[in-house]
Image (cartoon, rainbow, N blue to C red):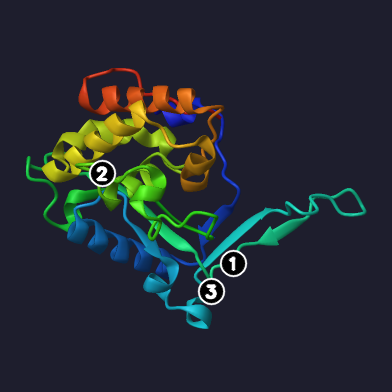
């Protein structure tokens, strides 16, 4: 049984979906193209880049959350709000190399297996535009792809699927593996503030020490043969 099925359900602030099969396929096509172009297993694209900006993008995705301002109505029932996909939203893809991919990494869309993809309203941190320096990631060997790795692979929707990635991670592009290696090694020693990590991933940690310890385990799991998949806090 996959470890994800053994864990309690993990939820972020939004429950989101694509509104049609056509919208899902369009997102997958765009994300796979970005993955191959950028040699990135966790591409993040602005929602408008996939579906069109402003009113052109309507009707492709929905997100719903409990109203943070007024969770309960006068009748005691939960109240909900809908997410805004017209400004600041993103589409996330999390992929892994297909079995048997050579050491140079995936060369075509068929050599990428999808783990998950999903639309999400914008939050307080934009993974596409946030400066690396703001995250403490302006260090040698790290680029934007590591931000995407954190937001996607270690984000709330895919963090419990890390075991699926490990199975074929050796088939990722060599430069991508080195970016992830450098980023994890750096953050394990100097983790970002947990509030910032939550804004990027929607996975909460009690303190920076716990976050650094977890990222050290992820490093050991992906690069040092550590057998047990690290599990982030629920």
For marks 2 and 3 on the same chain, the one whose residue lies earlier in the sequence: 3
**Residue at the disc numbered 1:** 84
**Residue at the disc numbered 3:** 59
For marks 3 and 1 on the same chain, the one whose residue lies earlier in the sequence: 3
Q: Nearer the viewer, residue 164 or 86?
A: 86
Residue 70 position within the rendered picture, expressed as x and y whole percent measured from the top left: 80, 53
Marks 3 and 1 in Cβ contact (< 8 Å)? no
Give the vertical position of 47 relative to 142 (above or below). below
**Badge 1 density bin: few <14, some 14–19, many ≥20, Cα 10 Å:** some
Q: Give the CA distance from mark 2 to mark 1.
A: 29 Å
Q: Nearer the viewer, residue 108 or 89?
A: 89
Say which element carries label 2.
Answer: strand
Q: Give the CA distance from mark 2 to mark 3.
A: 29 Å
Say which element carries label 3.
Answer: loop
Say left or right for 118 vs 14: left
> Residue at the location (40% across, 22% down)?
213
Q: Nearer the viewer, residue 13 or 219?
A: 219
Residue 204 position within the rendered picture, expressed as x and y whole percent measured from the top left: 54, 35
- Kindly give the residue lying farthest to the bottom in the view shown: 56
Q: Nearer the viewer, residue 215 or 64?
A: 215
Q: Nearer the viewer, mark 2 or mark 1?
A: 1
**Residue at the disc numbered 2:** 96
Say which element carries label 1.
Answer: loop
> Residue at the location (51% across, 27% down)?
7
For marks 2 and 1 on the same chain, the one whose residue lies earlier in the sequence: 1
Residue 206 position within the rendered picture, expressed as x and y whole percent measured from the top left: 56, 27
Give the vertical position of 27 relative to 56 (above or below). above
């Amino acid at each position: 049984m996959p470890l994800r099925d053994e864990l309690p359900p993990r939820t972020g602030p939004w429950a989101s979906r694509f509104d049609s099969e056509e919208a899902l396929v369009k997102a997958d096509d765009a994300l796979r193209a970005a993955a191959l172009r950028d040699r990135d297993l966790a591409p993040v694209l602005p929602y408008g880049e996939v579906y069109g900006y402003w009113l052109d993008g309507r009707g492709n995705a929905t997100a719903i959350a409990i109203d943070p301002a007024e969770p309960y109505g006068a009748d005691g029932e939960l109240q909900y709000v809908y997410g805004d996909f017209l400004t600041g939203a993103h589409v996330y893809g999390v992929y892994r190399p297909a079995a048997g991919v050579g050491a140079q990494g995936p060369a075509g869309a068929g050599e990428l297996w999808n783990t998950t993809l999903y639309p999400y309203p914008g939050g307080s941190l934009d993974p596409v535009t946030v400066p690396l320096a703001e995250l403490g990631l302006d260090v040698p060997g790290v680029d934007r792809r590591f931000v995407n790795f954190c937001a996607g692979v270690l984000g709330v929707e895919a963090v419990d699927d890390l075991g699926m990635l490990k199975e074929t991670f050796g088939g990722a592009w060599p430069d991508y593996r080195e970016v992830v290696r450098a980023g994890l090694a750096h953050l394990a020693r100097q983790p970002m503030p947990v509030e910032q990590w939550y804004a990027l991933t929607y996975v909460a940690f009690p303190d920076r020490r716990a976050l650094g310890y977890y990222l050290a385990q992820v490093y050991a799991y992906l690069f040092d043969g550590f057998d047990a998949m690290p599990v982030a806090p629920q």
